[in-house]
Image: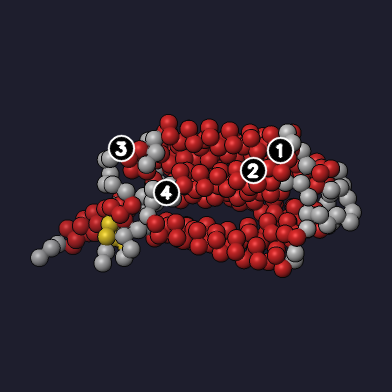
Amino acid sequence: MLRPATVMRLGHHMADTATHEAHVTSTGLSNVKLGMWLFLGSECLLFGGLISTYMLYRGRVSNGPTPEQIYDIPFTSVSSFVLLMSSLTMVLAVAAAHKKDDRGTNLWLTVTALLGATFVGGQVYEFTAFYNEGLGFTTSLFGSSFYTLTGFHGVHVTVGIIMLIALVAINKRSRVPGSKSETVEMIGLYWHFVDIVWIIIFTLVYLIPV
Amino acid sequence: MTTDTTHNTAPSHGTDHAVEHGMSTRGYINIALILAAITALEVSTYYVDFGPLFLPSLLIMMVVKFFMVVSYFMHLKFDNKLFSWLFYAGLFLAVGVYVAALATFHFFLR
């Protein structure tokens, strides 16, 4: 018969093992990853709606400047390039996490957050410049749909930056729950999704004229 | 039936990462360079007149960039097909719904 102290030790050992090994699922796939892909699939519907609304209303300018008058393509191109490169640094963070390289993971996550912050900073500058040029949220249907679409995207990037910074902070304390590489990978998937949405926005909103 | 999650989508721990996810660090950098080159080409359409090729070329470059990031950076090319199904179901549903919605507003006839 097992003594209480032995049972407690066994319990601790099992709990410890559970946190370090993969969960067993009926599909054989990670439920967290399945959930993330399902979430990203549903996000396509959200951004699809916002992009379609913009496409419908971009020519509806009763007041204020038109897209051609205010878009600064060279500036937005640099922002797009920065966000695109943040996808590279994110995938390097995921690769480092799979190699159990904590230092590399934290470094690339931090660089990704900084590149993301640069992009959001650029968007804040752009919004301010557009507002000063006479394009408010309610100035025209073009203004409303533009700010809603790019604003939603900016909020997604900001949420991503918060997740990256939080992950670095938690990782430095070695308190990432469950599989660390999977956690980094999930935040990576979210980050890349934000990037692919911008790939579409950059072309449809900025590069294709009304 | 139950299976260990680590054994279905990737080889067991201890294998080379490049094998595990189908790409090496050099491979990721090459993909990023290709993406940067396509972006530069996209931006060039703003300065150079591509004539009738302007719209199709921009849309093709956008789609190529999209699928490169999804396939290689998001590892969908190397992962279990169920993940692809989940994502592409949402993507194609969105494209179908909103193309239909735009068509009802005669968007493509303008």
Point 71% across, 38% down: residue: B50
Q: CA distance from mark 3 to mark 1?
A: 45 Å
Point 89% across, 54% down: residue: A63
Q: Secondary structure at mark 4?
A: loop
Residue B51: which quarter of the image? Answer: top right
Q: Which mark is residue B50?
A: 1
User: Marks 4 and 2: which is nearer the front?
Assistant: 2
List the residue tagged with mark 3.
Answer: B16
Q: Secondary structure at mark 3?
A: loop
Image mark count? 4
Using the rendered image, report if marks 1 and 2 lie on a common chain: yes
Point 55% across, 44% down: residue: B64
The image position of residue B14, as x and y in percent, is 27, 40
Could you tell me the amino acid type at mark 2?
Answer: Ser
Q: Which mark is residue B77?
A: 4
* N-term mark: 2 or 3: 3
* N-term mark: 1 or 4: 1
User: Marks 3 and 1: which is nearer the front?
Assistant: 1
The image position of residue A54, as x and y in percent, is 73, 56
Q: Which is more toward the observer, A71 or A103?
A: A71
- Residue count near mark 4 (Cα–Cα under 10 Å), binned few <14, some 14–19, many ≥20: some
Could you tell me the amino acid type at mark 3?
Answer: Asp
* N-term mark: 4 or 2: 2
List the residue tagged with mark 2.
Answer: B57
Q: Secondary structure at mark 1?
A: loop
